[in-house]
Amino acid sequence: MKRRSFLSFFIPDNHSDKVEKPLNASINPYTKPLDTLTATHLLRRLSFAPSPALVKQLIGKSASEAITLILGNEEMQPSAPSWINSSTENPRGADIYTRNSIEGGWKNLQGQLQTWWLTAMHKETLPAAEKLTLFWSSFFTTEFVSDDTYIPPQMLYRQNALIRKNRLGNFKSFVKDITLDPSMLVYLGNVLNIKGRPNENYARELMELYTCGIGYYTEGDVKEAARVLTGWKVGMFNDEPAKNGIYNTYFHPPDHDNGSKQFMGMPIPSRDDIANTEYLVKVEEVNDLIDILFDVRADAISRFIARKVYLFFFYSNRAVVDEEFIQKAAKVFKDNKFEIRPLIEVMLGSEFFFSEYIKGAQIKSPAEYALSISRPLNKYQADMANALKGMDQDLIDPPNVAGWEAHQKWITTKTYPNRKVYIENIIKVLTDDECVNFVKSFDQYDDAVELVKNIISILLPLGVTDGYRMYLTDAVLLKNQPAYEWTTMLNSKATVALRIKDLLNDIVKAPDFHLC
């Protein structure tokens, strides 16, 4: 995408055609103290949107210090919804009225789950956990409904919590946890994987989509991995077995293939009935399977994950990736024994991340787009989840196992009008007090020139031309009155609201508002 060819009025010429040219990306640490431009860039990528208060926390810090502050620790979890332990009978064994009622209840809870997560995204300050949670949720995908099969939102909530807990931890451990996650077991059919009738779906995706990628495993590896993964079930309903409690995974020994396996050239021994237990099969087969995968395919896995981080946090165009940068990042990941935090710290703390090639290069996902206005304005819209669906991002219900394509797919003839209407509606319903509070969240808010400059820095990812900034200040905010009149206008909430709404409406029309 020659994303700058149509932005010349809004963006200075020295930013033109940046990412599309050949890259020479440095993974060396970015050592300059953060200023407004670099602080807002980091906040847009590692959280959902900058605000004046968040920017002030980062200005003057090193990139390393700022990233440490944003990342926080692994134990950050929003308060759980009240319904996460409610359960139902299996609707497939019920009459049509009961089935419709149960599935209708799930649809309602799915909407509540999406709203719960978006509220967490909207409200979080620093540290910020939700952007990384969204990244991994988009990686370890699970659809709410697929092929007429529903996954209860109670289980999807648990998976979301599991992902958040593991977002900065050890990736190998993460893969072990997600392999036996109840939602994943149901979604990719591993609950149907039994001795003599293996279901190879998860075994294949484990390698193709979640670790090493195509070209680093054989069909034999898929078949043997599927045998290792036989026998796991999920307690989904209150009228069916749930040996470890409702919405938890359990092991059913008769369904496990306890014969010997050979995975990627490494043996996994057979076991007798006495050793065919949940604990031993998990430790000696499932965990061993993943250990072998990470030992044999360490280089491929490291490159695969470094590339995924790059595509999500740097630039989503798969045709423009600096392979040398990926290789260096992969080495960091492998050398740190697949710890996620060092990988994020090195990649997002690099000179390349803060370079002109990356700032303002990424098309905002619908979640990023909606939150990039709701967070600075402190204006959460209750219909945000439905609005995101209209922009083709149905949270916790991706289109398929590969997730969202992103990049140019986010802006289409269908989604662009929906993006536009959503932003316009948020601005339209702002109250006078909300507009005044937004203005007063900025330093020097009583200076019209500085106010417009600071609002631009929060809402747009790059500097704008002097001509456009003067237009916004003189024609839009001041209505061609002298700048000193702004202090008088501040005495009238209605006047402030009217002028700020006009200013916001003009800024969000800028094509650059769709970028981060």
Image (cartoon, rainbow, N blue to C red):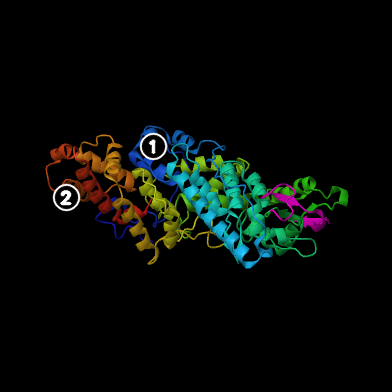
Image check: 101 left or right of 124?
Answer: right
Image check: 136 left or right of 377?
Answer: right
Q: Nearer the viewer, residue 100 or 213?
A: 100
Q: Is mark 2 on a helix, strand or loop?
A: helix
Q: Position of residue 210 (x, y in %)?
A: 61, 54
Residue 242 part of the magenta-drawn span: yes
Q: Which of 429 and 104 is in front in this view?
A: 104
- Which residue corresponds to the image point at 46% horizontal and 48% vertical from the top-left? 118
Of the residues shown, which amino acid type is indicated by label 1? Answer: Leu
Q: Quadrant of residue 452?
A: top left
Quarter of the image that includes the N terminus: bottom left
Q: Where is residue 512 in the image (x, y as percent from the top left)?
A: 32, 54
Q: How many labels, in total? A: 2
Q: Where is residue 506 in the image (x, y as percent from the top left)?
A: 25, 53
Query: How far apart, in angstroms, are the residues tagged by discs 1 and 2?
Result: 29 Å
- Which residue corresponds to the image point at 21% horizontal and 44% vertical from the top-left? 494
Image check: 111 left or right of 302?
Answer: left
Tell me: residue 451, above or below residue 90: above
Q: Residue 277 carries which label?
A: none
- Which residue corresponds to the image point at 21% horizontal and 36% vertical from the top-left? 446
Magenta residues, as a range?
A: 238-263
Mark 1 crowdedness (10 Å alpha carbons): few <14, some 14-19, many ≥20: some
Of the residues shown, which amino acid type is indicated by label 2? Answer: Ala
Q: Nearer the viewer, residue 433 or 38?
A: 433
Residue 338 part of the magenta-drawn span: no
Q: Is mark 1 on a helix, strand or loop?
A: helix
Image check: 508 left or right of 309?
Answer: left
Q: Which mark is residue 54?
A: 1
Residue position for label 2: 475
Magenta segment, principal secondary structure?
A: loop
- Earlier in the chain: of badge 1 and badge 2, it is 1
Mark 2 crowdedness (10 Å alpha carbons): few <14, some 14-19, many ≥20: few
